Image: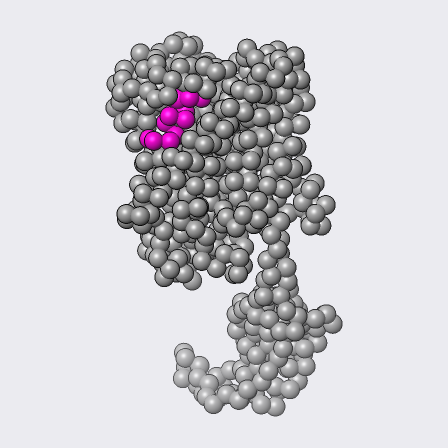
Amino acid sequence: MKLINAVIKPFKLDDVKDALKSNGVTGITVTEVRGFGRQGGHTETYRGAEYKIDFVPKVSVSIVIDDEQADAIVDVIASAARTDKIGDGKIWVTDVDRVVRIRTGEEGPDAV
Amino acid sequence: MDSGNTAWVLVSAALVLFMTPGLAFFYGGMVRSKNVLGMLMQNIFAMGLISTIWAIIGFSIAFGGDGPIIGNLDFAFMENVTSLDDNIPGFAFFAFQMMFAVITPALITGATADRLKFGSYVLLIGLWSIVVYAPAARWVFNANGWIFEMGALDFAGGAAIHINAGMAALAVVLVIGNRTGHGSEPMPPHNLPLTVLGTGILWFGWFGFNAGSALAADGVAAQALVNTQLGAATGMLGWLLVERIKTGHATVLGACSGAVAGLVAITPGAGFVGGVAPMIIGTVAGVACYFALFIKAKMNWDDSLDVIAVHLIGGIVGTLVLGFFADTAVNGEFNGLFFGGGIELLKDQFVAAVGIGVFSFVATYAIAFGIQRTIGLRVDLDAERVGLDQSEHAESAYAS
């Protein structure tokens, strides 16, 4: 099992969700996050005073999935979230030791 | 007594009361999210404390007896207020003036945001209302007051309220110092929609503030209402114009700030000017108050939400330009420089502005300094870091 974590632009969330659904992903978890990468922050002006806003709002999408599907799904996310402009985000994949469906007690791929 | 006039003044009292929660939202949106309840509380609490003090003694100091500086105790605990029954009931005037007394100390909270101990704040505005506001209101709004007697004009409180609160704000800021992290950490507004809501409420309530100050439902009230609208409108336009030229953007906060600056500046002249004068006054205020924003940076005063730029400078602009634009064809006995009255009124306006400003600064500084040196006026560093919502009130504004 793999955990895919994708940090994306908030306005691309619907595109990513639709792409995942049409590629057979049955569940995702979404978190609103803030951070910065190469994009850096941006500047806001309040009453003539400039503020550097370092942390940019992003959305983090988490998916637990079978090993053999992981690479394909990463590509699906990347193409759905891409705008070709700086700040499109990152995707990373980690191993998952154990997954349990709370209601039934099923484990592993059956639980996803 | 006239029932139409009475009805209008009673409604106006309610309108002016509504400005204080409006101010709470105006300021509340501009502070950081950890301090929003602290800010709302300081404002809403003024409605509780100052109303009570006003009934016990404030009104009497402002309107009792015939002294030029300070009143007597004839009206303490609302004794004898019905003796003021005339065109409107004494209690209508009492209630209308009460709402002015409530909002004036609340204006100060914008400058001192995020760092006052609540208990000390209670003492500060309680004393301030008795020692500073009540005498200033007497000087300007009571026919025996020295500024009124001198012939200076202040229809609804440009000097008594806005210059007064603005100078008081500066005095308290000098006593308590800047917010921790001021100048090094960004402290942008946490919820500008609240500020827009507050601006709308303030603007709406200001019709009671200014048109109600006619103390009658008559032509002067109607003129004051129109002037109020145009002051706010052109204040917004003036501010946004310079902001757009200087920064490239017309901001929402700029629109709100400019409208309030225009409202402040039209306040002293609302019932004394006509024609295009309110549009000129509003525009000048919007531009002047925008540029006044940079005073605090130059002086390193952490006037957190720009009470000096908007209320002090707006109040000074409004008070002084009345010396040019006052028109007896509209109302009153004195013409300004542009209407054949010569320099006399302008001179009186200047004396009124300086008199109120100096008195407010000195008296407020003494009160704030006394509190700071005894029970402390400013929260400690940990409390400031955590935010007033938790440290002073044990509450959170937003579920997390």
**Figure quadrant of the C terminus of chain B:** bottom left
Does the stretch in magenta take in B46? Answer: no
Q: Which residues are magenta?
A: B130-140
Residue B282 position in % (x across, y down): 63, 30
Does the stretch in magenta take in B134? Answer: yes
Q: How is the image coloured?
A: one colour
Of the pair B135 and A34, the residue shown nearer to us: B135
Residue A71 figure quarter: bottom right
At horizontal 45% and vertical 21% (from top left) the residue drawn is B140
**Figure quadrant of the N terminus of chain B:** top left
Residue B334 figure quarter: top right
Residue B295 figure quarter: top right
At horizontal 65% and vertical 77% (from top left) the residue drawn is A77
Is residue B371 something that shows in the picture? Answer: yes
Please give the count of numbered marks on the rendered protein. 0
At horizontal 55% and vertical 86% (from top left) the residue drawn is A94
